[in-house]
Amino acid sequence: MSNYKNHRKIAEKKIGRKLKRNEVVHHRDHDPENNEPSNLEVMTKKEHNILHFKGKNALYKFRKKVREKMESKND
């Protein structure tokens, strides 16, 4: 199995479902050879782009905004 599919399969097992079309697997330590489950994080393509092009703080702010929007819809 190629390394590309391997990290996706490991991440799917970790979260207990198949990845959605808009999801990617991020290697926290930026080492694509390190497929330890603790090193893998499933995120949307948008979140992944924010993380790599704007940084962690921007990602946290984006996720907070999404959570707040979802919570306000549930009220």
Image (cartoon, rainbow, N blue to C red):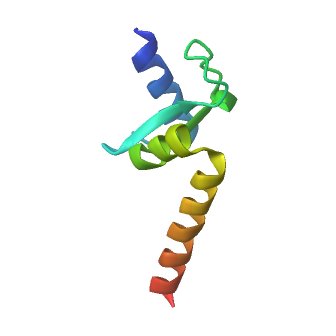
Residue ID at (66%, 52%): 57
Residue ID at (54%, 61%): 62
Residue found farthest to the front: 54
User: Relative to the observer, which residue lies in front, 37 or 62?
Assistant: 62
How far across and down, in percent of the image, does residue 52 sit?
Answer: 53, 37
The answer to whether any part of residue 16 appears in the image is no
Give the image quarter of residue 37: top right
Give the image quarter of residue 5: top left
Total marks drawn?
A: 0
The answer to whether any part of residue 20 appears in the image is yes
In the image: residue 75, left or right of residue 2: right
How far across and down, in percent of the image, does residue 58 sit?
Answer: 59, 54
How far across and down, in percent of the image, does residue 67 sit?
Answer: 55, 70
Residue found farthest to the top: 1
Residue found farthest to the bottom: 75
In the image: residue 59, left or right of residue 69: right
How far across and down, in percent of the image, does residue 47 sit?
Answer: 48, 48
Residue ID at (55%, 17%): 32
Name the quarter where the N terminus is drawn.
Answer: top left
User: Relative to the observer, which residue lies in front, 67 or 51?
Assistant: 51
Q: Is residue 64 above or below residue 4?
A: below
Residue ID at (45%, 84%): 73
In the image: residue 41, left or right of residue 12: right
